[in-house]
């Protein structure tokens, strides 16, 4: 699968914050050209006897966002990557197959739910070098940087994840210092033409750990995605069932949360059309050293 974040941030001589591309091995040439998801090896099921129960944290979360009110809390959430100007938008230049340009207008909040809305519409954006470029998809993303970052804990996201053609939903953590890797992908979901659900960890040594679980219909109703990050392990759950775990190269640094609705293909009718609905994001930090944030 392809790398989700840029390898490192840098400032060009013009003052534009740009980025380097991640390792080429993460994205086969043919797939990069088409914007497709790479071939996925068959998964080996984890024996039921070794599965861990989903964490049930007690006490008040260190971070809790239930998206009440009419507008997003901008003291906690940003609507673009931290190197970009949120008023003009952004995209993930590290992924060659992405079609979307993120705009604040595509981040909406109503009824206690965050809506990241994708629409197939010509949209003015920029290249990584800051030159004008037209994108055929506009969409939304949110990030907790600079409002909140943390080291170790339990992350719980309750969401409805679309299955529309071309869409690529993701919940993920990246390093607060802007250096990639590490990256922890809590959940990625690709719609047709290459439908798949994935979870992965990109450690400092680039030895990616990935899983491709079989799930229920994530586009129907709300589903709970959980990640437990300790000094010795990372473990993922979907709707209470463990789906992936690793104990290798666990990051020991501050990271922050991102939710986005990307688009990786415009091949099929109806592409870049749909919404990622997030009902809540909660983080129980261990140890709870950061200030408590709520909205």
Image (spheres, rainbow, N blue to C red):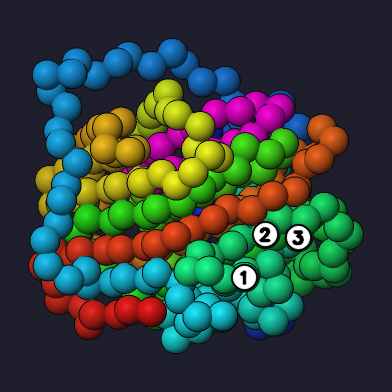
Secondary structure beneath label 3:
strand
Residue in the image at 53% along x and 69% along y: 111
- Residue 256 x/y as whole percent: 37, 65
Name the front one of labels 3 and 1: 1
Q: Are marks 2 and 1 in contact (CB under 8 Å)?
A: yes
Which quarter of the image is occupied by the C terminus? bottom left
Magenta includes 189?
yes
Relative to 129, say whether 219 is above or below: above
Q: CA distance from mark 2 to mark 1?
A: 8 Å
- Mark 1 lies on residue: 108
User: In this rendering, would 208 be left or right of 108?
Assistant: left
Name the front one of labels 2 and 3: 2
Magenta part of the chain: 186-208
- Residue 190 x/y as whole percent: 60, 36
Q: CA distance from mark 2 to mark 3?
A: 8 Å
Dot label at residue 117: 2
- Residue 201 x/y as whole percent: 36, 42
Picture quadrant of residue 288: bottom left
- Residue 47 x/y as whole percent: 19, 16
Relative to 73, say whether 181 is above or below: above
Dot label at residue 138: 3
Q: Nearest the camera: 241 or 233? A: 241
User: Can the viewer see residue 3 in this picture?
Assistant: no
Magenta includes 95?
no
Relative to 205, say whether 109 is above or below: below
Q: Earlier in the sequence, mark 2 or mark 1?
A: 1
């Amino acid at each position: 699968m392809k790398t989700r974040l840029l390898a490192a941030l840098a400032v060009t001589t013009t003052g534009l914050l740009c980025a380097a591309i991640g390792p080429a091995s993460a994205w086969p040439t043919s797939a990069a050209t088409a914007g497709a998801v790479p071939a996925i090896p068959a998964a080996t099921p984890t024996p039921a006897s070794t599965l861990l129960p989903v964490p049930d944290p007690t006490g008040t979360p260190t971070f809790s966002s239930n998206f009440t009110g009419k507008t997003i809390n901008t003291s906690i959430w940003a609507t673009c990557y931290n190197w970009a100007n949120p008023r003009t938008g952004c995209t993930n230049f590290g992924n060659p197959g992405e079609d979307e340009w993120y705009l604040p207008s595509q981040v909406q909040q109503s009824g206690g739910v965050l809506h990241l809305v994708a629409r197939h519409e010509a949209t003015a954006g920029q290249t990584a070098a800051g030159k004008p470029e037209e994108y055929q998809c506009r969409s939304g993303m949110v990030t907790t940087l600079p409002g909140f970052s943390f080291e170790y804990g339990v992350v719980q996201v309750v969401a409805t994840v679309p299955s529309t053609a071309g869409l690529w939903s993701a919940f993920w953590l990246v390093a607060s210092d802007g250096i990639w890797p590490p990256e922890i992908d809590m959940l990625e979901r690709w719609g047709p033409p290459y439908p798949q659900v994935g979870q992965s960890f990109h450690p400092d040594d680039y030895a990616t750990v990935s899983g491709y679980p079989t799930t229920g219909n994530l586009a129907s109703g709300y589903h709970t995605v959980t990640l437990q990050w300790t000094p010795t392990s990372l473990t993922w759950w979907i709707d209470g069932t463990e789906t992936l775990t690793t104990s290798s190269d666990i990051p020991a640094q501050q990271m922050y949360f991102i939710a986005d609705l990307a688009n990786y293909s415009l091949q099929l009718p109806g592409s870049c059309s749909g919404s990622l609905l997030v009902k809540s994001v909660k983080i129980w930090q261990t140890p709870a050293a950061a200030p408590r944030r709520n909205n």
